[in-house]
Amino acid sequence: MKIPFVSFKPMERELDKELRNAFERVYMRSWYIEGVEDENFEKAFAEYCGVNYCVGTGNGLDALMLALKALEIGAGDEVIVPSNTYIATALAVTYVGATPVFVEPDIRTYDIDPKLIEEKITKKTKAIMPVHLYGQPCDMDAIAAIAEKYLYIVEDCAQAHGATYKGKRIGSFGDAAGFSFYPGKNLGALGDAGAAVSNKKSIADKIRALGNYGSDYKYHH
């Protein structure tokens, strides 16, 4: 008997009518980039995460990269990341020209070990990027205590949709956070997709502009 390692069929069958209706709405409007469907999702997902703003992106890597760019992190800067994570976490840092600095995990959780972060901080360090691995939240109290002195927090929530830490949704602890909607994620799209969330309007606005060729309104770049 062959059992598929990953199959989307059960999910798709369960949501078949809703998915087809959503496709029909988009198709009939002929509006395939952003638009009202995307706007509705952004509002609903922001509310779900307990944040003020959500900006749709092409994928989870874009969400993290744009968040770093919005915080003006770039060449010459360093970002603390866990040593055991998917490559996209480190790529987001290198794509903006910064350097990822790796910190080992807590053996009990496999999340980044807060006790090892401070020894890796230098004058070049600008942010900590905790990854909530397999949906298990990092120790955000300890990380926030370190970051509040002088660093940004950009959460990598690619595997943590819906997870909570002390009653608060993951994605709402940092200056910004990135989610992936790759088909195999907790909340998967029919294709690739992502979102960046933040409680700060200035950051969300900048992420949206950067994701649209630097345009904050039509034909203004």
Image (spheres, helix red, strand yellow):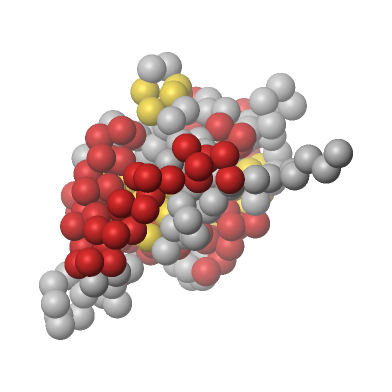
Front residue of 156 and 46: 46
Q: Which residue is at a point 23% across and 72% down the rendered structure image? A: 30
Q: Is residue 153 above or below residue 215?
A: above
Please give left or right for residue 69 compared with residue 92 in the image: left
| Residue 17 placement: quadrant | top left
Front residue of 104 and 192: 192
Please give left or right for residue 77 compared with residue 2 in the image: left
Q: Which residue is at a point 33% across and 58% down the rendered structure image? A: 23
- Residue 109, image x and y in percent? 67, 25
- Residue 101, image x and y in percent? 62, 52
- Residue 140, image x and y in percent? 47, 28
Q: What quarter of the picture does the N terminus occupy?
A: top right
Q: Which residue is at a point 42% across and 54% down the rendered structure image? A: 194
Please give left or right for residue 132 compared with residue 49 in the image: right
- Name the residue furthest right: 1
Please give left or right for residue 177 compared with residue 78 in the image: left
Residue 146: tell me if it is visible: no
Q: What quarter of the picture does the C terminus occupy?
A: bottom left
- Residue 35, image x and y in percent? 21, 63
Q: Is residue 9 above or below residue 191?
A: above
Q: Which residue is at a point 20% across and 67% down the rendered structure image? A: 29
| Residue 66 placement: quadrant | bottom left
Residue 44: tell me if it is visible: yes
Count of numbered circles in the view: 0
